[in-house]
Amino acid sequence: MTKGIAIIGCGRIGRIRGKIASEFPGISWIGLCDINEKLGYQLKDDIEADFFTTDYSELITRPEVDAVIIATSTWSHFEPTLIAIENKRKIFVEKPLTLDANQSRFLISKIKEHNTDACVGYTQRFRRKFISAKQKVSSNQIGDITCAVTRTFMNRMGPMNELRLTQDRNSLTPMVVSGTHSLDMSLWLINDQPKSVYAKSSDKILGEIGTKDATFGLFTFDDKIWSMNICWALPKRWPGASYGLQLGFVGTHGIIDIEDTHRDVIIASEFDQGKIYRPAGREDEIERYVDFLTSYPPGDIYNNELWGPVKDETFSWLQRICLDKQTPHANAEEAHRNLFLTLAMDLSAKMGQEIDLSIDEEEIMEKLNRTE
């Protein structure tokens, strides 16, 4: 049985997922929504979508819609997600679920109330090296994990692009916006819940635009420890297109050491290799002549076609909604946990003290929003 989908947000990621959906045989109807009419109508023409509107409520409630992809800006997921839940749509929402832990918890309650199938876009789960590692951990090949280390480095063009679109930057921190990817991947492998966290942040580079440069934290469990670190303030000319990871998991009977910095395939050219983030008016801001190939998070382009994790993630979600296939997507509860833990790291860094993770959502948001 074919399905109809709504795509809310026609930017870079909405365009990618829309093109994949347009080529999937199980999708018979596609509706689009964006506040930018020019952007939306261009995508409608490119993928031969059936409908476009600037009103996401109008689109989500249309009878043709069975499932919804929410690919809006980071801070604008809550309202369309809630409408999709209340209209009993299957949902795929880009990470994070929201930026507010209270809103996130409310969405979880609604998802349970309506028995909604809701997935969240933690694309790293569809990278083959991580799927392989998950299988080895799940089959007890390294025993019980006793300690773990996660290090994330990012080109600063990412946060500069993210923050240019809003003045409300309280929750647009390295952990909440980007570190959540590596946090999710680490916890997917650790498969346990931490009890406390102690973190520190720095802001010498990006402080002037309203965010932190880096946040380093130590999570404590009943029987293990985990160092979770991110810096998204690397130079604009850093060869990594966006994300570079190093992860290590030591178990009672083995170790998994994952190198995902993309430094194994490097191009150096006399021609500009471009960058992921090219917002209007800033296309030529920086030139990059050295690049780590395969470091573009959605995947790699060949012959104007995307290949890689976002394609696999989107394709398997379409199989999920059309064929009821079991998939490795993060569910909404896991996404809420990820948001909660990233906010707890930010709170620890703000207060300069260890945070007991029995703290609830209301308290964590009240303390984060409190002005000293």
Image: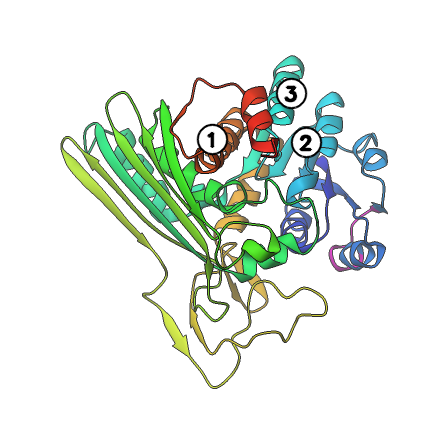
Which of the two residues, 249 or 225, is positioned nearer the viewer here? 225
Which of the two residues, 89 or 284, is positioned nearer the viewer here? 284
Can you see residue 66?
Answer: no
- N-terminal of the pair, mark 1 or mark 3, is 3
x%, y% of residue 54?
Answer: 85, 45
Q: Which residue is mark 2?
A: 1
Q: What residue is drawn where x is 68% and y is 37%?
A: 77
Q: Is residue 257 found left or right of 302 in the rendered image? A: left
Farthest residue, direction left: 253
Label 3: few (<14), some or many (≥20) within 10 Å?
Answer: few
Q: Nearer the viewer, mark 2 or mark 3?
A: 3
- Residue 347 to residue 235: above or below: above
- Residue 112 to residue 67: above or below: above
Which of the two residues, 151 or 14, is positioned nearer the viewer here? 151
Q: Which residue is mark 1?
A: 344
Label 1: few (<14), some or many (≥20) within 10 Å?
Answer: many
Question: Does the CB distance between marks 2 and 1 fall below 8 Å?
Answer: no
Is 29 magenta? The answer is: no
Q: Nearer the viewer, mark 2 or mark 1?
A: 1
- Where disc 1 sits, the SS reads helix
Q: Residue 67's image quarter?
A: top right
- Where disc 3 sits, the SS reads helix
Q: What residue is drawn where x is 76% and y is 56%?
A: 43
Question: What is the span of residues highlighted in magenta in the rendered image?
Answer: 45-51
Q: What residue is drawn where x is 54% and y is 50%?
A: 311
Label 2, label 3: how far apart the Cα atoms are: 32 Å
- Where disc 2 sits, the SS reads loop
- N-terminal of the pair, mark 2 or mark 1, is 2
- Residue 295 to residue 340: above or below: below
Label 1, label 3: how far apart the Cα atoms are: 18 Å
- N-terminal of the pair, mark 2 or mark 3, is 2
> Tag on residue 106?
3
